[in-house]
Image (spheres, rainbow, N blue to C red):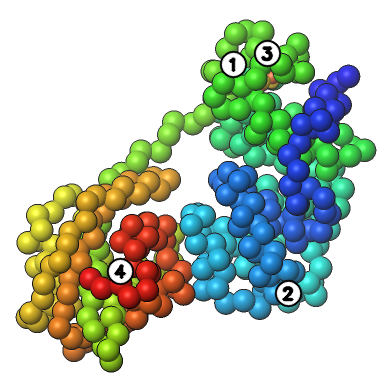
Amino acid sequence: MNISQTLISWYQLNKRDLPWRSTHDPYCICLSEVILQQTRVNQGLEYYNRFVERFPDVFFLAAATEEEVLKLWQGLGYYSRARNLHHAAHMIVQKFNGVFPPTYAELLKLNGIGEYTAAAISSIAYGEVKPVLDGNVARVLSRLYALQEQVDSAAGKKLLNGIASQLIDPADPATFNQAIMEFGALLCTPRNPGCETCPLQSSCLAFSLKRVNDYPVKLARTVVKERYFYYLVVTFVKQGELHLLLNHRNSIGIWRKMYDFPLLESPGELEYPAVLSAQPASIILNDMPFEISAISDEYIHILSHRKLITRFFKIKLQRQPESIQPYIAVPVSQIGKYPIPRLIDRYIRAEKLLVPGYTL
Ligand code: SF4
């Protein structure tokens, strides 16, 4: 058996039973592939089921507001994926009457569909002979051929694409692509790959060189910068109900269109009085009497190239400030309706802010 046949046979015996594996519906395949980028299958499965239930086809997804989509995506991170998915749904409905274009080249023209997703949809839904290239595939190929090229460089991707194009089974590209991704996810894993039981052991150059852990070769990691976040959880009673201030993030950035609290961001650590005398606290509090009822422990939140070291200041006011622009006053009981970043979600859960009858 050649490499392709071996991968497919292994896949038939070992594949996980997942809902998107039993369909050729391009919408479901698109949804699953976008969700599974940078997400573990167990977590992704839950989100996939949620999305299919709420937005059963591309028309439902296109008709939703971006806020609804972000809310359903909440907790998955990398929110640009949700925005891109939503963009693509719009284009498919508006330009193609809700039918996904059937070729890689046409899919790639859609806003929000990248090379990986276009290859997955065109091969799995429509049988185009187009290899997918994700982290799993890159790892498997770089080990099989002991590739010295950095897999995340342009030259490395070109090389991997060339190899995958040679290996892909032209009679069944859908199964081949899913097989090699599953093989990388389950057997040829980043750490402790199952080389002893691997059906490709005799073809694997990295294994024969005893250098499995040296592959894949990658570009130097991006430097992770530390930022200090000081959030103000400003509460007051309005019309008999406990409210707090939310910030709608309209600027560009990973949390665009999501909600958080008024924020002071700093490149270095600040003393607490400095937090309260700087904006936005100085503007919100504006000589009003206030009480700091708690300052949280540090919450560490890691993004791809940022480490956010965060503290939340609970600030009680007697009434709503005169001017709360650019923030909005929201009843605490309603926060669950707003799309919020995972960092804020962690705090809200830890503080049990959504428990009925919550008081600060
Ligand atoms: S022998 Fe090990 S490194 Fe090589 S393909 Fe198999 S699992 Fe991966």
Residue pointed to by mark 1? 212
Q: Residue at x 18, y 49 (%)?
A: 268
How far apart are the two marked residues, 3 and 2, measured between alpha carbons? 48 Å
Q: Residues within 10 Å of mark 1 (few under 14, many from 20)?
A: many
- The image quadrant that residue 10 belongs to is top right
How far apart are the two marked residues, 3 and 4, measured between alpha carbons? 51 Å
| Mark 2 / mark 4, whichever is N-terminal | 2
How far apart are the two marked residues, 2 and 1, measured between alpha carbons? 46 Å
> Quadrant location of ligand 1?
top right
Residue 4 visible at all = no
Please say if 28 is above or below 188: below
Q: Which residue is drawn at 79% across and 64% down?
A: 100
| Mark 4 / mark 1, whichever is N-terminal | 1
- Give the left or right position of residue 22, taking residue 329 as reference: right
The residue under label 2 is which amino acid type?
Answer: Phe
- Cβ of disc 1 within 8 Å of ligand 1? yes
| Mark 2 / mark 1, whichever is N-terminal | 2
Residue pointed to by mark 4? 261
- The image quadrant that residue 132 belongs to is top right
Q: Which residue is drawn at 21% across and 56% down?
A: 296
How far apart are the two marked residues, 1 and 3, measured between alpha carbons? 12 Å
| Mark 3 / mark 2, whichever is N-terminal | 2
The residue under label 1 is which amino acid type?
Answer: Val
